[in-house]
Image (spheres, rainbow, N blue to C red):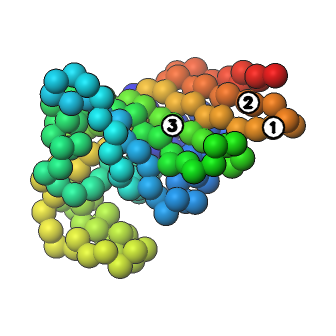
Amino acid sequence: MTTWDGFTAAAPRIGAIFARRHRATGNLCLLGTLRSDGYPRISPVEPRVFEGELWVVGMPGTTKFRDLARDPRFTLHTATVDTHVGDGDAKVWGRVRDVRDPALHQRFAEDLYAETGFDLRGQTFDRFLAADLEGASSVEIVDGHLDVTIWRAGEPERVVRKH
């Protein structure tokens, strides 16, 4: 499993596209999880990068977080509105792990407040989910061609050009 910093070092092209699209949508992404009946679920979420980790955070008690408590596998896709993918598109996948560290939770809350004004300072986090990344991919138009970049943990990025 790979942290966010490890991922962006190993897969800089995908990491840059993901970061660019994440910022462009105000941090909105689509989270794919597995429901209790085995069917997939897609939910909006605003993941955050903090202290070298990608955190899958949101309103506690929602079905997406119940899904992740039961099965930690996920995929996270940058939200896109451009059917021509002019600004690229990216997704990452892996498993979440619950990090029980009250000091980290409070540093995160302080950073969130400083950046957005949303105040979680002083609150206790029931679950705090870090993303351990296993793979990623991106698409972008380069010189009139579609470049698909693929990464798996432990391997370098590779680009497949579609003509």
Question: Pointer 3: what residue?
Answer: 91
Q: How crowded is mark 2: few (under 14 residues within 10 Å), some or many (20 or more)?
A: some
Q: Do the residues labelled 1 and 2 touch (CB within 8 Å)?
A: yes
Which element is circle 2 on? strand
Earlier along the polypeptide chain: callout 3 or callout 2? 3
Disc 3 and disc 2: Cα gap in Å?
14 Å
Disc 1 and disc 3: Cα gap in Å?
18 Å
Give amino acid for label 2: Asp
- Which residue occupies the foreground of this view, 97 or 78? 78
Give amino acid for label 3: Lys
Q: Residue at x 28, y 68 (%)?
A: 109
Q: Residue at x 77, y 23 (%)?
A: 161
**Residue 132, percent from left and from top:** 37, 35
Which element is circle 1 on? strand
Tally the marks. Answer: 3
- Which residue occupies the foreground of this view, 123 or 81? 81
Q: Which residue is drawn at 43% across and 74% down?
A: 115
